[in-house]
Image (cartoon, rainbow, N blue to C red):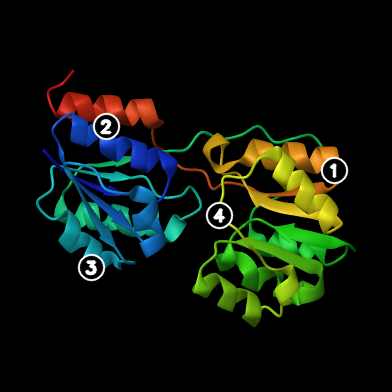
């Protein structure tokens, strides 16, 4: 059984190995070389790296028995393109959803980065951004002196911080996972008043960030996860087993 898996999450990496162990021929598609490093190598798995448009996705899924979308829960455009490509090529598609987290009491919750930034514009105090380099543009009007972005240690991330006017001393170029203790230390070290995050679920360290913000006295600002239909890890794996005749 030939499976195309668009990944970028812990669950996607885990699923690719499980399907290969069941005898599937798995092609994992990741957006960056960093994603390729995270995926690693394993028997039965081929890794393709590089961002694809819908046409490229259609060529990749053509002739496959199944496609699994295990991209990040906030990667809406990627998921739309994957769905359209699969519909065009008539390839069955499963969406793997990451487990959601309960919203902590007292969190300021917003539908998107721009509305969160608009709300923060009426506040004062340093802001720890843990939403990634792609969201920096929305927060740029708040002023680089307020922002402490935690981004992956990649040249593209550093360039995004530079464009946003963030001083070099404010850039936290680190690779997770991050413990509650480390999150607390960063909040205290940089006198953070607001911690901005997405709901990356347990695998994305959301609980550790929420607990650290509470313990260190920072207000949690949550960008709400878009609503989607799909299955959790075990549900997707079971459907794959049935399609592969493994019960």
Counting from the top left corner in percent of width and height, residue 81 is at: 33, 60
Residue 182 placement (x, y as % from top left): 71, 45
Query: Is 89 in front, or is 142?
Result: 142
Give the quarter of the image for residue 140: bottom right
Circles 4, 3 touching at the beta carbon (< 8 Å): no
User: How far, Cα to Cα, is label 1 from label 2?
Assistant: 39 Å
| Label of residue 55 in the image | 3
The C terminus lies in quadrant:
top left
| Disc marking residue 228 | none
Residue that extends furthest to the top in the rendered view of this protein: 247
First reached walking from the N terminus: tag 3 or tag 1: 3
Left or right of 222? Residue 9 is: left
Pick the quarter of the image with the N terminus: top left
**Position of residue 117 measured from the top left corner of the image (x, y, whole percent):** 74, 64
Does the CB distance between marks 1 and 4 fall below 8 Å?
Answer: no
Q: Quadrant of residue 26?
A: top left
Vertical side of 91 occupied by 50: above or below: below
- Residue sitting at x 74%, y 72%: 169
Earlier in the chain: of badge 3 and badge 2, it is: 2
Which residue is denoted by mark 2 in the rendering?
18
Q: Quadrant of residue 70?
A: top left
Considering only order in the chain, which callout, 3 or 4, is on the residue closer to the N terminus?
3
Residue beneath label 4, please?
175
Q: Which labelled disc corresponds to residue 216?
A: 1
């Amino acid at each position: 059984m030939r499976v195309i898996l668009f990944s970028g999450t812990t669950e996607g990496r885990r699923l690719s190995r499980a399907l290969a162990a069941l005898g599937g021929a798995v092609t994992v598609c990741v957006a960056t070389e960093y994603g390729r490093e995270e995926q690693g190598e394993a028997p039965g798995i081929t890794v393709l790296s590089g961002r694809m448009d819908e046409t490229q996705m259609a060529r990749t899924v053509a002739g496959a028995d199944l496609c699994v979308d295990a991209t990040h829960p906030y990667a809406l455009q990627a998921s739309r393109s994957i769905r359209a490509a699969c519909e065009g090529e008539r390839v069955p598609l499963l969406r793997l959803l990451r487990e959601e987290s309960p919203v902590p009491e007292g969190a300021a919750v917003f539908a998107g980065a721009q509305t969160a930034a608009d709300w923060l514009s009426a506040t004062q105090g340093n802001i720890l951004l843990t939403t990634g380099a792609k969201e920096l543009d929305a927060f740029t009007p708040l002023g680089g002196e307020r922002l402490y972005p935690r981004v992956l240690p990649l040249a593209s991330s550093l360039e995004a911080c530079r464009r946003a006017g963030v001083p070099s001393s404010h850039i936290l170029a680190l690779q997770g996972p991050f413990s509650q203790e480390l999150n607390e230390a960063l909040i205290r070290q940089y006198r953070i008043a607001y911690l901005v995050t997405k709901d990356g679920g347990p695998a994305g360290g959301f609980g550790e960030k929420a607990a650290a913000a509470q313990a260190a006295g920072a207000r949690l600002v949550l960008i709400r996860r878009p609503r989607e239909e799909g299955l959790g890890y075990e549900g997707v794996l079971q459907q794959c087993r049935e399609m592969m005749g493994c019960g």
